[in-house]
Image (cartoon, rainbow, N blue to C red):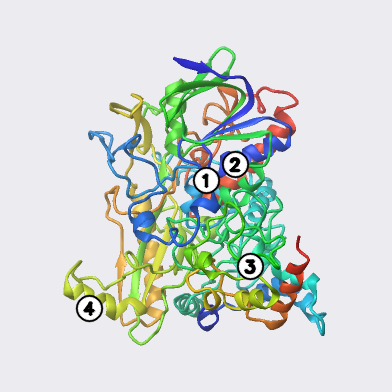
Amino acid sequence: MRDKNSGLTPGALFIAAFGAGLLATTAATTAFAADADHGKAVFQTCAACHTDRPDAIGPSLRGVVGRKSASVDGFHYSDAMKRANLTWDEANLRDYLKDPQAKVKGNRMPFGGVSNGTDLDDLVAYLKDYK
Amino acid sequence: MVTRLKDVDAVTVGFGWTGAILARELTKAGLNVVGLERGPDRVPGEDFILPSVRDELRYAQRLELMVDNSIDTITFRNFPNEQALPIRRIGAFLPGEGTGGSGIHWGALLWRNLPSDFRVRSALTERYGKNAIPDDMTIQDWPVSYDELEPHYDRYDRLCGASGQAGNVQGKKIDGGNIFEGARANHYPNAPIKSSNAGVMYGAAAKSLGYHPFPAPVAIASSAYTNPENVTLGACEYCGYCNRIACETNSKASANSTILPVLRLDPKFELRSRCFVTKLSYDKAAKRVVSVTYTDMRNGEEYEQPAGIVILSSFVFGNVQHLLLAGIGEPYDRDSGKGLVGKNYAYQYEAGASAFFEDKELNPYWGSAGMGVVIDDFNGESFDHGGLGFFGGGYIACNTAGAPPIAGRTVPHGTPEWGSEWKRATVKWYHHAARFNTQGSVYANRNNFMDLDPTYKDVFGRPLIRLSYNPPDNEYNMSRFLLTKLEGIIKAMNPTAYDMHPRPKTFTVVPYQSTHNTGGTMTGADPKSSVVNRYLQAWDAHNLFVQGASVFPQQHGYNPTGTVGALAYWSAQAITTKYLKNPGPLVQA
């Protein structure tokens, strides 16, 4: 939705490139195997909500790989997520993070998904060790 | 019976942006701080979540995040010879309530005043002569300069994860940014948020006329960003719902999303929500506020909280009311011109337009609270006022904050307000309408002020604030001037039709215009001309620091919150580096 309709002023483009520099450089180093360091940079997008703090908008993702869906104590999951009955293995996580509404329709996470395949692999690699 | 509590080092009266900034800075300096907030605690993980947060009816129409008028309101009259009446349901301005205050539902426009704004009386006198300023225009220079505030503006930018295109970094002008702005030490921490189709069309038209368009600066993270408090803000998802509503992705900055995640874990800080402060106890001889008294709104119990430092960080009306009720400073008397508390009230002068483009798909449903493209060619002293018949100015914007289902139905003038014809028009124009705004300054006038109402009282029996306000001819002329410039740009966009929306000469408290109320406890160089000194310390109570837009001596052509945040950091720095070492007046009267 955003990309189709975006229109930046020339100045905005200059700054967008400037701001994205850090991510782009790290991405360039991920030629072959999944890169958890780069995954950590991708995880910044998740970290706004998925913190360990008591006022967090999302559930903590520490130890998420291998966990049952909707299983963090005290977090108010959507009915859709409560019904999903998934184990967050790598394949399920990858599908979910690629397109959250396709994998668990009606869940309440306000996030459109990670479209870049390398970013997705690296993010899952990072989450495996995020404990 | 009032229960007297144990002393604390500092207390904040109100817990929006400034209460949170001061609480954070003071706890970092080792103080124990209690944050008192009249409204409920608002926790992102409980209150800012889908699907409930995208409820335009609940929040934007029924105003769930705003002050509760069954407890408190203000009275209003246009002119001092009228009987003021209570505003039973707020409309033109919408102060928030609860932790985060108005900084939850705000539009997140993050502006700085121009360097010349801080010395407006001197600047106008130098440029237009010593008799140029009318007698009733009670503007005055700020006691602090842009250069002094710049590091604090910068700090607030970083706290908020601000997104924008700088136009002046260390004196180097940058095309595509606001070339009229004061020099910044740094670029914005994030790239500008996106521009809508309408914004791009507006920018192109403005440029064709020789103006300098740029994306509006906002306290909304355009990408994931970790602020200096080590709190990560999310990338804006452009949901198009966030005016009057909380942010579901921690992208739009609020005290709740940027500072409170840290403060909530700090044992030196205690938040007490639903605690309504009704009184400051003032020791006039010692020039100190001894304690604050509050009512626990859950059970009606009263408590007295003694404190070493009192941070007065409620909304403009609350700040002024507290000082007047406590007898701190001399109340302003309009007839004699004497007194200062309540003086120089100003209210942002906005006026807009809408335009319709039959053949253009504008996709208005997506957007972000402050999203827009702006020109700032006609603000403050950035242009010559010779022969124009007014001082001041403002920025001119194409706003594309989203078009939600209830309020986002812009139709041409003359369309019925309901019924089948209205329905047809909303379907025809929804995708093809663009909205514009001019955001103008209000230079203070002796007739615009706040005092205590002689008749009406709040639920605690305290006199309400009485607001006397009507925009002077100066502001009316300023606004008309900005609208002619806007009309020129709209014409250059070649619309199918357009409507200009000038404000009537008489101010009304509906419909919504902005929540930019300022003045009443103005900052200044000496106690003869101001209520607080340059560090926002009350001249008449050295342990009382008054925060927020009530300290503005007048209103410049920008949204106030950027300057409010910068002043909070500036004031906090003075407290932690000067006042704690040597409690007493920081500026000798």
Q: Residue at x 59, y 33 (%)?
A: B525
Q: Residue at x 24, y 77 (%)?
A: B425
- Residue under numbered circle 3: B223
Which amino acid lies under the numbered mark 1 shown in the image of this protein?
Answer: Gly
List x then y, in percent, for residue B484: 37, 67
Mark 3 and mark 2 on one chain: yes
**Chain holding disc 2:** B
List x then y, in percent, for residue B216: 53, 65
Cβ–Cβ under 8 Å for marks 1 and 3: no
**Sequence order check, earlier mark of 3 and 2:** 2
Locate the N terminus of chain B by quadrant.
Answer: top left
Which amino acid lies under the numbered mark 2 shown in the image of this protein?
Answer: Ala
- Residue under numbered circle 1: B100
**Sequence order check, earlier mark of 1 and 4:** 1
| Residue B477 disc label | none
Which amino acid lies under the numbered mark 3 shown in the image of this protein?
Answer: Ser
Cβ–Cβ under 8 Å for marks 4 and 3: no
Q: Residue at x 30, y 47 (%)?
A: B509
- Residue under numbered circle 4: B424
**Sequence order check, earlier mark of 1 and 3:** 1
Q: Is residue B512 visible?
A: yes
Q: CA distance from mark 4 to mark 3?
A: 39 Å
Element marked by disc 4: helix
- Residue under numbered circle 2: B20
